[in-house]
Amino acid sequence: MPGSKTGDKKTVLFLCKCSSNISNIVDFEEIKRWAGEKGDTNIAAVSNLLCAPDGKKFFSEVIKKKNVNNIIIAACSPKLHEKTFQDIAEKNNINMSRVRMANIREQCAWVTADKNEATEKAKSLINAAIKRSFLSEDLKRRTMKAYSDVLIIGGGIAGIETARTISKTGRKVYIVEKNITIGGSVMKTEDLAPSMECSPCLMAPILSDVRDDPNIEVLANAEITNILGFFGNFNVTIKEKPRYVEDNCIACEECFKVCPVSVKNEFHYSLGERKAIYTLFPGAVPASAVIDKNICKHFTDNSCDKCVSVCPFGSINFDQEEKTTAINAGSIVISTGFKPGDLAGFPELGHKSINDVYTTYELESLLSTNGPTGGKLKPDDEKIPASAAIIHCAGSMDSRGIPYCSSICCTHAVKAGEMLGKVYPAIRVFNIHNDLVFTDPEEHQFYKKQKAKGTTFIKCFDLSSIKITKTPDDEKIKISGYGFEPISVDIAVLATGFKPADDFKELAKIMDLALDKNGFFRPGHRILHTTASEQDGIYSAGCASKPVNAAAACTQAQAVAGDIMSRLIPGREIELEIFTSFIDEEKCAGCKMCIPACPFKSIYYDPERKISIINEALCRGCGTCTAACPSGSIFARHYTDNEINAEIEGILHG
């Protein structure tokens, strides 16, 4: 047996004092005496700080001079330094599996006050590591070539900025967008607060850059159906819906004029209309129009082909079919945006039941010159509104709607007043609020600017008490609430928060990612890595992990791009998981219970051999399949039943 007294090879025990963290409570002389009497170890080497440069040099010299087979290190948590010593051992031609750590700091010295008890516990932990080490089998490091291409889910400003940054290095970038064009929510408004910079002016050259960049491929009107793999080697399946219009279309809009069908335009929150053949906005990328098969008369009753006859490029193709595309990528970025808060559960706010009550998103769309009404609330109505009330936290901070603060809605509320004043200079604006949240000095200055212009800010300590009413005889909207005198205004604006997009749950399921309690993607770390996910190689930018404004979304996008580019170097290989599971093919009964148990989809069934097979390139070594196998035919490398039983035996019978 390797490491036994009779063998030529030796098991060396390193004892690390960790300065005085361990040695003050664990009796090292007693440990050395005990180890010598047991005879399982041939050397007991003591270091003051084994992880320090001198300590690592000492470690290397000992294992180099002695004929060492197994190495036991009694020190801190293996999470901190096991890899450090495995790497040193491998440089000295000792397999990494032969290095094992016994945690006598966190699990012993730091939690046991009595020195005798701590010393006895340390013996048990060391003995467990020794017993298990005798059954260790050599592990082999494996590498594979990594894909340096990147796939981005969501074509809003965050996804676009990520793509533009990465493409500059020559990498191929794919943007998968469920809508018919990229651009996202920024394209639904005319100005970005607090700077009030022109959104179309900002986005037009960016969209042109994407359109003309040979390294960026946009797959719009598409959705992700499956994702397999890991960092450096993801395989993504994408379903592209037919547009029924070829790519040579330049959106000249000649077909729009003859299309007989009109429906509410979802892009403008159903405030305007679109035709059965349409684009979202001028300058869209992709430029080609799309036919809505559900309402187009060619598909519903075969009564209209007018678009075919007027198209100067012959772009209409009713025979297009759904297409499935498979893409290999080294990393995936989620930038799927957000959904405005829903006010259906708040009838007291009058949305959609009282005329002249809008959400901030609806107001922005109406007041934008690129919106459905050409920049006015009601272009056919000569009456100019004299007053407006903007209600903060509408549907937010309430269990009926959004239970949290979205942090950027206050700025949107202030922006509503700015936009109203721009179109109707004489209008009087009231902001009804409780807390006011501004995330940076520029946003706070934006608020002060509104106050200086004459906007009245009214404090309401209980926003859930607000009621918006209007009787048929009233010309004005009445707003009442706890702590302020009721006011009457011409229009009311509801500042709603940000919700996770509708497809978050489905995406999380496909990618095996966790969502937080609010439904956003949970970051890898709330402080150290907010743009990472819990799956290595999958990142989030924009509103995927929490509500952010456009500036923060761009900053996140650049951070994600930088991290990906630093890790995915073209031509460089990545190291695969070492502690994978494997199947004893002679024992496997082909019951398939391991297949649904695997969270990484690394197991498949071979119908010819009637057994399950593990693709070890996809396996991440979690061991779930090992526990699920009823026949005991699946083994986890470095964590076999025999090794674990030996470790338990060492603890109980030291």
Image (spheres, grey):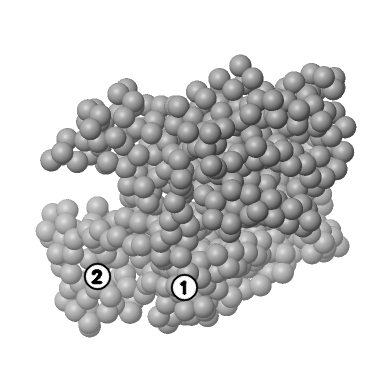
Secondary structure beneath dot 1 equals: loop
Identify which residue is drawn at 66% across, 30% down. Answer: 126
* In-image side of 245 versus 221 (left or right): left
Residue 159 pos. (x, y %): 51, 64
Q: Nearer the viewer, residue 618 or 120?
A: 120
Identify which residue is drawn at 40% across, 45% down. Answer: 619
Q: Nearer the viewer, residue 174 or 411?
A: 174
> What is the number of the mark on residue 570?
1
Residue 104 pos. (x, y %): 73, 32
The crowd level at tag 1 (other Cα within 10 Å; few <14, some 14-19, many 20+) is some
* 52 over 309 or under it: above or below: above
* In-image side of 623 versus 582 (left or right): right
Whole-number angstrom distance, CA of label 1 to CA of label 2: 36 Å
Q: Nearer the viewer, residue 181 or 342?
A: 181
* 403 over 627 or under it: above or below: below
> Label 2 amino acid?
Val
Secondary structure beneath dot 2 equals: loop
Regarding residue 548, the answer to whether it shows in the image is: yes
Residue 71 pos. (x, y %): 61, 42
Mark closer to the chain start, 1 or 2:
2
User: Nearer the viewer's eye, disc 1 or disc 2?
Assistant: 1
Residue bearing mark 2: 245
* 632 over 452 or under it: above or below: above
